[in-house]
Amino acid sequence: MKKVIALACAVILLGSNEVLAQRKSKKKKGEKHTEQLYVQPKLVVGIIVDQMRYDYLTRFWKDYGEGGFRRMIKDGFNFKNAHFNYKPTYTGPGHASVYTGTTPSDHGIIANNWFDKELGEEVYCAQDEAMQSVGTSSAAGKMSPHRMKTTTISDQLRLATQFRGKTIGISMKDRGSILPAGHTGEAYWFHGKSEGKFISSTFYMEQLPKWVADFNASGIANSYKKDWDLMKEASDYTESGSDDNNYEGKFNGEAAAVFPHKLAQIWDENSQFDIIKATPYGNSLTTDFAIAAIDGAELGLDMHTDMLAVSYSSTDYVGHQYGVNSVEIQDTYLRLDKDLERLFAVLDAKVGKGNYSMFLTADHAAVHVPNFLKDHKIPAGYLKGGEMKKRLMAFQKETFGSDELIRDVSNAQIFLNHRVIKNLDLELKEVQETFAMELMSYPNVHKVFTAYQMWQNDYTEGLARIIQNGYNQERSGDLMLVFDPGYISYPQVGSTHGSSFTYDTHVPILFYGKGIKKGASLKKVSITDIAPTMAALLGIAFPNGSTGKVRAEVLKK
């Protein structure tokens, strides 16, 4: 009897499971399953704000509107403790790392410019002499991503859609559009001087699309030939230092670096349209072009997910000229907030609210002006690179009897001449270590790492790991220098970046839109986590060199 009852229960259970399964998979004859294991937005938007420190979100929070940064933070996911995990923190490596999900050790973009050991000369990260300019007769378009060794999230999306999905990269800077667009997208960047238009390269096309040509002919760029004055009352800029100070650079033709900046009066003295780059108007023009791309390229209008990669470069130009604590940087971010609101409104109207997914981050942050720090008794200063190099050149002659051991000094790296070292019957490891010991005696040198250390060890944490992540065996030098915190090689006004310290590594990472949870986290995460997280969201293959982690806490189930 017990066996009969048990058998009956099993039959009932099996039948109910079968009914449940049929309900889940019920479909018309010949119809495919529609259950999704991934999110399929119509458009993915990647935004990089060049030189954006994380504290620009909190410092200017009270003056942001509801439709820009606040919208992303309130309705999206905010990583408050996100960092770059390598050195150097420059624009080229930053853009490459965000989109490849790995570091210079793998993607190969070790700086903006670097000494090529094979060619024996300096090369630029996006330079490609095999290409021709499109949209200008100048050489400004002889560019491509050919020096980037790995794929990007934008490449993987193109592959996943059988190249039906479109990818467009946009920036004031060539590298700011080329590296995010990857090897398979299209890239457009602003060529200033007397032309003032967006251009491209034969790597992507033979002529500009009609929508780009129409934009260039519209005169929009010329509309920004106007004064740059404060967006709000001067008394509202309480989160910055005084407008008139000794820490800021000024445009050619200006008597002082104070508002209003009369751009039209000093237009010709500052390479004409190039002056727009160093004002908030460069971000506005970038937004204008991004909106034109959404319309002209019909992004997000079909079943194949497209990608729009927008890099706002003017924040970097303004930061370099005026510094972290300037009224100019605050006004620039308040205006950028308005531009983001404008872009989001177009996305809502054209693609549909809830139909796109987005991330926002930076390619690096920035240090306060050292003179400003010094005046407030914080250790900081300026490196005497010329004196250091002169002393090092004399050292090689005194120690090794040759003045040909050093090939190049750049990007806080020293490249040695391996051929000369071999001809002198010297051991490369010993030569590297000898130079390292010498360099450690120089003022403001904090640490020195040798290439041999990078080859022989697998560092898992700390400064050594950061250096190793930035070290590419094929392209990097023999010695990597780390200078004291707050010390830079730069003019006495304005800010810069490039170090391994938190003022250069701490940046925003915001996720927003379709498939993204609302929330925030203080967990320490890496910039390289963005690409694999987006790949997991989209259900596509990761970039082929990706070393970052999927941040599952931002993804809806």
Image (spheres, rainbow, N blue to C red):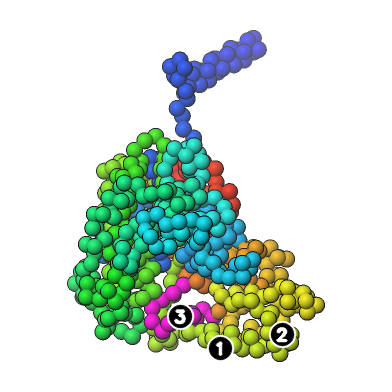
The secondary element bearing badge 1 is classed as helix
Q: Which residue is mark 2?
A: 402
Lateral position of residue 152 relative to residue 66, left or right:
right
**Quadrant of residue 220 within the rendered picture:** bottom left
Closer to the camera: disc 2 or disc 1? 2
Residue at image x 52%, y 57%? 130
Residue at x 56% of width, y 65% of height: 110
Residue type, mark 3 in image: Tyr
Residue 396 is left or right of residue 50, and the answer is right
Image position, residue 151 (x, y; %): 54, 50
Is 489 colored magenta in this rendering? yes
Q: Residue drawn at (60%, 61%), measured in percent from left and top?
A: 105
Residue contact at pointers 2 and 1, CB within 8 angstroms:
no
Is 88 located above or below residue 8 in the figure?
A: below
| Residue corresponding to mark 3 | 490
| Nearest to N terminus: mark 3 or mark 2 | 2
Instruction: Please state the horizontal and vertical placement of residue 31, each as a whole percent of the image.
Output: 45, 20
Say if 304 sits above or below 292 in the image. Answer: above
Please name which of the two marks, 3 or 2, marks the residue nearer to the observer: 2
- The residue identified by callout 1 is 387
Q: Secondary structure at mark 2?
A: loop
Check disc 1 and give the amino acid type: Glu
